[in-house]
Image: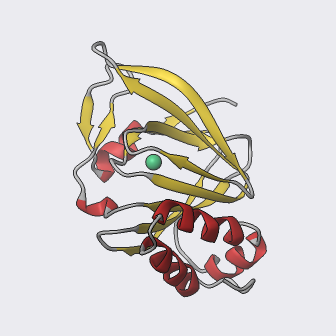
Amino acid sequence: MTNVFSVEGLVQSIRLAADKADPEAAIREVLVEVVKNPDAIFAATSGEDGDETMYFEDDKVSIWRCRFQPKIVMPPHEHCLKVLIGVYSGGEKSILYKRTEEGLSEAGSVTAHAGEVITLGKAAIHAVTTKDDNPSDAIHVYLGPLMKLERDLYDWESGKAVAFTLENFEAMKRSVVQ
Ligand SMILES: [Fe+2]
C-alpha cells in the first residue's frame, strides 16, 4: 500500500489480505497503514453521500466507511461476524452488551481512537457513538458477507431481538447529552 489512498486500492489490498492464511492479522496490517493518512482518506471519499458507504462485499469480506455523529447512539446490534475497525478521525465508542435471561446487560465499552485498529468478536453486541463532540470516521472490515446475513437489533429496554431493518435501526437510535 502506498501513501496515496484510493478506495480501489483499499478494496484490493483487503481482498488480498482476506486470502492469506491469517486474514485477521493481514487485514489489520492493511488498516494500520491506511489510518495513518486521514487526509488522504478524506480527500478520496469527500464526494460520497451520507455517513456510510459500502465499498465491497463477497463471501469473505465486507468493507465499509462509517462515520458516526456526536450525541447519537446507534442501537445495540450484532454482526454475526468478526469486525476490524480502523479509525482515522475522532473516536468510535462501542458500548458492549451480553445477552441474559432478562435481556441485555452492559458489559463495558471499548473506544477506538484515531490511528487505532480494534477487533470485535463474532458474538459481540454493541451500541455505537462517538467518544466526544466530534464525529468519528472509520473503515470497518467484516470477515464475511454482512448484508447476506440475518442479524438482529436489540430493544434498549427489554433486550429482545428485533429484526435488523433500516426502519427499526433509525427508529431505535438514541440522542444523548454528552
Ligand atoms: Fe456495528
Residue depicted at 29% across the width and 62% down the height: 147
Residue depicted at 34% across the width and 68% down the height: 60
| Residue 73 seen in render | no
Residue depicted at 33% across the width and 23% down the height: 159
User: Taking 112 as reference, is 35 above or below it?
Assistant: below
User: Taking 145 as reference, is 8 above or below it?
Assistant: below
Where residue 169 sits in the image (x, y, percent)?
A: 36, 45
User: Taking 138 as reference, is 11 above or below it?
Assistant: below
Q: Quadrant of the N terminus?
A: bottom right
Where residue 91 sits in the image (x, y, percent)?
A: 70, 48
Q: Relative to 39, is 126 on the left or the right?
A: left
Where residue 124 sits in the image (x, y, percent)?
A: 42, 38
Indicate how the structure is coloured in the image. Answer: secondary structure
The furthest residue to the top: 102
In front: 166, or 130? 130
User: Taking 75 as reference, is 39 above or below it?
Assistant: below
Q: Relative to 67, is 91 on the left or the right?
A: right
| Residue 154 seen in render | yes
The furthest residue to the front: 21
Q: Quadrant of the C terminus?
A: top right
Residue depicted at 24% across the width and 62% down the height: 148
Residue 157's image quarter? Answer: top left
